[in-house]
Image: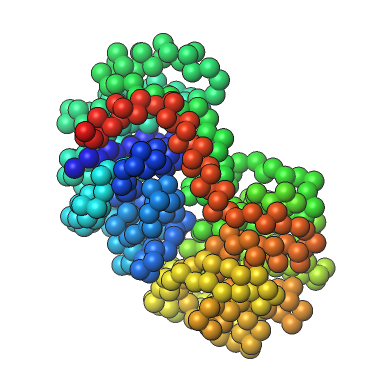
Amino acid sequence: MPALMLQGCGSDVGKSVLTAGLCRVFANRGLTVRPFKPQNMSNNAAVTADGGEIGRAQALQALACRTPPTVDMNPVLLKPQSDTGAQVVVRGRMVGAWEASRFQDRKAALLPTVVESFHRLQREADLVLVEGAGSPAETNLRAGDIANMGFAHAADVPVVLVGDIDRGHVIASLVGAAAVLDDADRARIGGFLINKFRGDPKLFDEGRADIVRRTGWADLGTAPWLKAAARLPAEDAVVLERPAVGEGRRVTIAVPMLSRIANFDDFDPLRAEPEVDLRFIPPGQPLPADAGLVILPGTKATLADLSFLRTQGWDIDLLAHARRGGRVLGVCGGYQMLGRKVADPTGVEGPPGEALGLALLDIETVLTGDKVLRQVAGELASGGAFHGYEMHVGETTGAGLARPFARFADGRADGAMSPDGRIAGGYIHGLFAAPGARAVILAGLGAYSHGGDYGGVVDAALDEIAAVLEQAFDIAALARLAGLP
């Protein structure tokens, strides 16, 4: 069955965006296309209709295919909770928290599950486009691999290798990969793609020819710097380290970059607002005193990041902001931090323990092993319809719940607010993508929302990227390599 896998010379070379773009290219040609990533590592996740979770990139790629996301599109998801451990999600369900060494020992046992999900997608599609993880040239991780060549061999999928010319040494990256891969892995690669080229691509003709001479792989094209990619939800936290834009706009919204920040793509729709200066504040910098709103984002380790927040002095900044009458919104783990106490008695997110919260909301949270995963819709207490999803562990109680932040369409209440409404929080992810809710929140800050549908912005960006790739890549050669007639 036709399939093609995009692997890379490293992380953040653009595999996710190129896969999404090619999904849209082939979908535009009338094919039934499905995305697939055997193993992903990200704290940005999406909830599927059946209550599972997958990497955000695969949900975006499903959108590019014009199909709903399913758990088979990303059967293994690792969500880092510490420098050496991660929550392990298999087919959309959390199976535990493993140290990295334990995962390396056990990952090969997950290969049958991965291949089964892949075959299930193959049965419903004309083409499956697969995204690798990291680089196949990381030879120390090759034994038991399920993310790159280990999967490609097990599922008999041809591979294209992506190099990122923007970071430099792209010739060395591609030629070096050919040098360190074994014969079988090297032979599975049918060609290479160059990504993120700025300027006249003809200037790199000799470099591409040199790569062909040294590797024997086919040159399948060079993609320019894809400006439309900035309008897509980001999955990799690398994007948060880039300089902010938008200074001088009407209202500043600050988001502290917690050490285990999760689902930070929640705030992407705010970037598109002409009156909003959205700033992710890195460690070591104070929260801006002129912020109209401070958002405490989600996190994969609430207690650890509550401690991290305090070591940065952000608790002092946040409490001073609240005393000045500033607004604060907590999302998921950030909501839990706004309460009086957070407890993790069984070590769901790390070592067992508890800590005092910021006491800006009259709530307390006990983290439990049951993870809530569901899509939701409703209306904010202040007005404004929303749609989004819940993805959290923890049971929250307290008098503050008598003033809910939102109410779901089924009548359930979510979150809490302070008596004056300036401090609020809840478990809703994806809130700002809804024009109604976004407009109400910005109006409370004295800013006007353009009211655009963020989903439409993303869809248009995918079309733009697909149009560029149609011209930049040898699509016919990619189709033949994938096995399309």
**In the displayed structure, does residue 412 sit left or right of residue 29?**
right
Q: In which quarter of the image is the N terminus?
A: top left
Q: Is 258 displayed left or right of 180 in the figure?
A: right
The one nearer the camera, 205 or 103, is 205
Residue 29 place in picture, x, y as percent? 36, 38
**What residue is shown at x 61% (from left), y 70% (from top)?**
385
* 301 left or right of 94 in image: right
Q: Percent from the top left, x then y, of residue 226?
A: 52, 33
Q: Nearer the viewer, residue 48 or 328?
A: 48
Q: How is the image coloured?
A: rainbow
Q: Residue furthest top?
A: 206
Q: What residue do we see at 55% from left, 38% from top?
A: 228
Any part of residue 219 in sight: yes
Res 140 seen here: no
Q: Which residue is drawn at 53% across and 72% down?
A: 377
Q: In which quarter of the image is residue 331?
A: bottom right
Of all residues, the one furthest to the front in this rendering is 30
Tally of numbered tags:
0
132 shown above or below 62: above
Instruction: Indicate whether 100 appears above or below 243.
Output: below
Judging depth in this view, the residue of 483 and 300 nearest the camera is 483
**Residue 186 image point, x, y percent:** 22, 28
